[in-house]
Image (tube, rainbow, N blue to C red):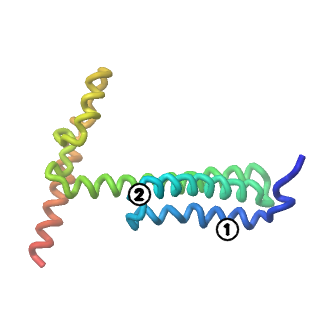
């Protein structure tokens, strides 16, 4: 059986992984408005992640330790991605006329309809306290801006 490590040094996996995963920066810079660019970016992030995990897997540590490193790195990557998505959603909500009123927002109408269709509890209605706290925070921020 042919081993790829005999042909490509493992350090190259790390370099390529970081370059490919680094294409994530295109999203906050709004360079992924084009659908083709977005698809290519997601493909590169996936390949980069595979290279990164392969590099970690091939580290000269006990396998158990490498698995633990892989789990930790995966957790960090997923957390960063989720924080970015949360920031994007909250930024959109901040600029909306239904700002943080998720129980009444027409943007969530399809979700609420699916809750009803599948006889599920509408969790958006239960977010009223969170919505009210977010609205109060937005009001405080806008009042601070007026005082300056």
Asked if residue 13 lies left or right of residue 22, the reply is right
Left or right: 31 with respect to 62?
A: left
What mark, if any, has residue 139 been given in the picture?
A: none
Taking depth in this image into account, of 5 and 129 the one nearest to the observer is 5
Q: Is residue 80 left or right of residue 113?
A: right
The picture quadrant where one finds residue 54 is bottom right
- x%, y% of residue 58? 77, 56
Up/down of 137 relative to 119, above or below: below
Q: Position of residue 70 (x, y in %)?
A: 65, 53
Q: Residue at x 24, y 53 (%)?
A: 93
Residue count near mark 1 (Cα–Cα under 10 Å), binned few <14, some 14–19, many ≥20: some
- Placement of the C terminus among the 4 image quadrants: bottom left
The reply to whether dot 1 and dot 2 touch (C-beta < 8 Å) is no
**What crowding class fits label 2: few (fewer than 14 Cα within 10 Å), some (14-19), or many (20 or more)?**
few
Residue 46 is situated, as x and y percent measured from the top left of the image, at 58, 52
Instruction: From the viewer's perspective, tell me whether residue 60 is left or right of residue 131.
Output: right
Q: Is residue 126 above or below residue 13?
A: above
- Label 2 SS: loop
> Which residue lies under the disc numbered 2?
34
Q: How many marks?
A: 2
> Alpha carbon of mark 1 to alpha carbon of mark 2: how far?
27 Å
Residue 64 is situated, as x and y percent measured from the top left of the image, at: 74, 49
Residue tagged 1: 15
Residue in the picture at 56% in, 52% down = 43
Dividing the picture into quarters, in which one does residue 12 lie? Answer: bottom right
For marks 1 and 2, give the one nearer the viewer. 2
Residue at 60% from the left image edge and 66% from the top image edge? 19
Determine the image quadrant of residue 101: top left
Mark 1 lies on a secondary structure that is helix
As rendered, which of 141 and 54 lies closer to the eye? 54
Q: Disc 1 or 2, which lies upstream in sequence? A: 1
């Amino acid at each position: 059986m042919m081993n790829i490590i005999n042909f490509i040094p493992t350090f190259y996996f790390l370099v390529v992984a970081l370059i490919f995963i680094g294409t994530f920066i295109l999203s906050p810079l709004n360079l992924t408005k084009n659908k083709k660019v977005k698809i290519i970016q997601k493909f590169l992030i996936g390949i980069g992640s595979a290279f990164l995990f392969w590099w970690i897997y091939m580290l000269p540590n006990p396998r158990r330790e490498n698995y633990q490193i892989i789990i930790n790195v995966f957790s960090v990557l997923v957390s960063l991605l989720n924080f970015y998505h949360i920031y994007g959603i909250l930024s959109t909500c901040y600029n909306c006329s239904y700002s943080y009123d998720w129980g009444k927002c027409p943007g969530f109408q399809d979700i609420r309809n699916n809750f009803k269709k599948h006889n599920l509890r509408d969790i958006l209605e239960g977010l009223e306290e969170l919505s009210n706290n977010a609205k109060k925070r937005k009001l405080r921020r806008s009042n601070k801006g007026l005082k300056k």
